[in-house]
Amino acid sequence: MDIFEFALKKERNAEQYYRQLAEKTDNAGLKNVLGMLADEEVHHCRVIEAIRAQTPIQITQTPVLKHAKEVFSKMKDSGETFDFDVTEVDLYQKACDIEAAAKQYYLDKAQEAQDTERKALLMRLAEEENKHLMLVQGLRDFVAQAETFLENAEFYHFDDYVEGEF
C-alpha cells in the first residue's frame, strides 16, 4: 500500500470513529464537536487526493478549534450537569491515540519527501492532526471530569492554534 492509500485509509477510519462516537453520546455539544472532527477528516482526504494527483490545492482555514471553544463555552453557560460512563473515557483516549499516530505518520512522511511542496503539505497535515489531538485530549478530559473541566478550562490554549488553521 502506498503512502497515499495508507493516509486515506487512516483519515477515513478516523472519520468513521468520530461519527461512531457522536452516535454514542446524548450530549448535543459533544455531537457537534465530533461531527466537526469527522468533517475535518473528510477535508484531509481531499487534500491527500490532491497531493497524490499533483493537483494544486489551496489550503483554506477551518475553524474547528474556534467552534469547539464556542461549544464548550455554551455548555458551561448552560448549567447542565454531565455524567459520562467511564468506558467513554477509553473511547476518547482511543481517539487521542488515532490523532497522535496520524500526526507522527505525516511527520515521518514529510521527512522522506523529496519535493518541497509535498513536504510542506505533509507538515501542514501533521500540524492539523496536532490540533485535533489537542481537541480530543480536551474531549477526553471533559468526559472524565465534566464539571471541573468546564469550571477550570477557558480554552485559552486553543487560541494559540486558531490563527493558522488548515
Image: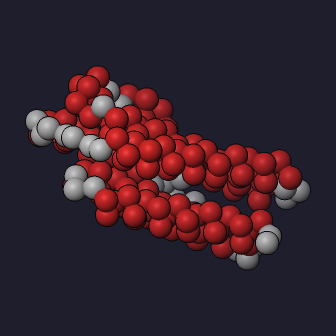
In this picture the colour scheme is secondary structure
Using residue 160 as the reference point, say whether residue 82 is left or right of it: left
Quarter of the image containing the N terminus?
bottom right
* Res. 55 in view: yes
**Res. 165 in view:** no
The spot of residue 37 in percent (x, y) is: 43, 56
The one nearer the camera, 8 or 126, is 8
In the rendered image of this protein, does residue 5 appear above or below residue 65?
A: below
Q: Where is residue 56 in the image (x, y as percent from the top left)?
A: 68, 70
User: For the view shown, which residue lies furthest in the bottom direction?
Assistant: 53
Query: Relative to the observer, which residue lies in front, 123 or 32?
Result: 32
Q: Using the rendered view, name the quadrant where residue 49 is placed.
A: bottom right
Say which residue appears at 56% left-offset and 68% top-offset: 12
Q: Determine whether 147 is above or below 139 in the image.
A: above
Left or right of 109, for residue 47: left
Q: Residue drawn 69% across and 56% down?
A: 121
> Where residue 28 appears, x then y in whole percent?
22, 55
The residue under the point 19% across, 35% down is 76
Say if 135 sits above or below 151 in the image. below
Query: Which residue is painted at 44% across and 49% down in the image?
Result: 91
Q: In which quarter of the image is residue 34?
A: bottom left
Of 27 and 52, nearer the camera is 27
Residue lying at the far right of the rendered structure: 114
Q: Quadrant of residue 19?
A: bottom left
